[in-house]
Amino acid sequence: GSQHGSMRVPTGLTLVALLNCTLANNTAYASATSALAFATGSYWEFEAVTSASKPLYTDALSMASNVQATVYVSESAVPFTSKLAVFANSGGCAVAAVFTVQGCPKGATCSVATEGPTSDDLCSIVYSQVRAAVTEPSNGTSDSGLPLLL
């Protein structure tokens, strides 16, 4: 992993976060920044996401509009969750990025959400991979037309 000062991702450029390594001085994280800012139209990629991934840490996260984030999953096990990023709470845990997932295995539902703040005032961006709900067609006795969830 690597330790950085403040980083700003300009319009049209991509920050790639490799999550398959750890910091030498703090093995809870893959890399760390003192501040991370995304300009309008910038990109954020999370590479090598597995159940063993370590998140990126930043003291301050800010995002303009239209930030596109992509999660590249490298594990087919279901279920698992993995923290992608951890950041200090500075007015809420909401993140303005639009997330897409590449590599979601067949039969799984994959999603990205924010969590927190925790008791130590940290927020997280978390990837989840769960088994997709199984649906059965109606048996004809209901006129709702909705599938039955098992």
Image: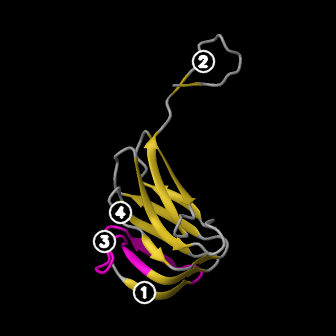
Instruction: Residue 9: give x, y in percent of width and height.
Output: 54, 82
> Residue 98, position in %: x, y?
60, 63
Compare residues 25 and 120 and report the one nearer the observer: 120
Q: Which residues are magenta?
A: 10-32
Circle number at residue 138: 2
| Residue bearing mark 1 | 4
Q: Secondary structure at mark 2?
A: loop
Tell which circle, 4 or 2, labels the residue nearer the N-terminal end: 4
User: Along the polypeptide, which appears first: circle 2 or circle 1?
Assistant: 1
Mark closer to the chain start, 1 or 4: 1
- Residue at image position (49%, 78%) is 58
Residue found at x 32% / y 59%: 52
Numbered disc in front, either 4 or 2 = 4
Q: Picture quarter containing residue 62? A: bottom right
Amino acid marked by disc 2: Ser
Indicate the amino acid at tag 4.
Answer: Ser
Number of on-image labels: 4
